[in-house]
Structure formats: C-alpha cells, structure tokens
Image (cartoon, rainbow, N blue to C red):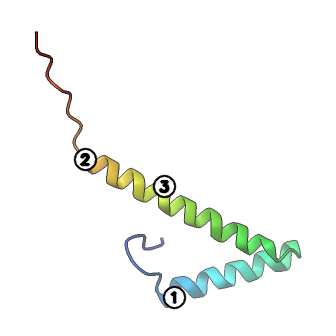
Amino acid sequence: MAEIMGAINKDWLDCLIDLYRRITQCTDDHRESDFLFQQLSVLIQRHNAVAVLSTSTHTTPKMKF
C-alpha cells in the first residue's frame, strides 16, 4: 500500500518502476507507464479528499420561525 500522507519511499518507488517496466514490455507502449502514474495520482487525490471530508462535521443551520 502506498503512503498517501507523505513522500514515496525507495522500496515503493522501486516497485512502481518495476511495474512500469513490465507494463511497457508487455504493451510495447512507453506511454502506458505515464497513464498508470496519472491514474495512481488521481486515486490518491480522491482518497485524500474523502479522508478530509469524512473528518469534518456537517451541521444543519437552525431554522428561525
């Protein structure tokens, strides 16, 4: 699992580089690794947004009659 609250450590980076290399070898398309990195970035951003929004309290304003 990737650390989403800080920098990517060397082991995780090595794993990603190996994954990108394997995907490029299978597809013979060097852009595939770029696409995968973009998707990973979006997933991390979405997860962070959900995590932040779930910690805030939702209050309903009181109605005055």
In the rendered image, the quadrant that contains the C terminus is: top left
Separation of residues labelled 1 and 3 (CA atoms): 23 Å
**Residue that numbered label 3 is attached to:** 46
Q: Residue at x 18, y 26 (%)?
A: 61
Separation of residues labelled 2 and 1 (CA atoms): 33 Å
Q: Is residue 64 left or right of residue 37?
A: left
| Image coords of residue 55 (percent x, y) | 26, 50
Q: Residue at x 21, y 28 (%)?
A: 60
**Residue that numbered label 1 is attached to:** 11
Do callouts 3 and 2 mark residues in contact (Cβ within 8 Å)? no
Q: Which mark is residue 56?
A: 2
Q: Indicate the amino acid at tag 3.
A: Arg
Q: Is residue 2 left or right of residue 13?
A: left
Secondary structure of the residue carrying numbered label 1: helix
| Image coords of residue 53 (percent x, y) | 33, 48
Q: Is residue 28 left or right of residue 62?
A: right
Above or below, comparing residue 39 to residue 10 in the picture: above
Q: Residue at x 56, y 85 (%)?
A: 13
Q: Is residue 62 left or right of residue 31?
A: left
Q: Residues within 10 Å of mark 1 (few under 14, many from 20)?
A: few
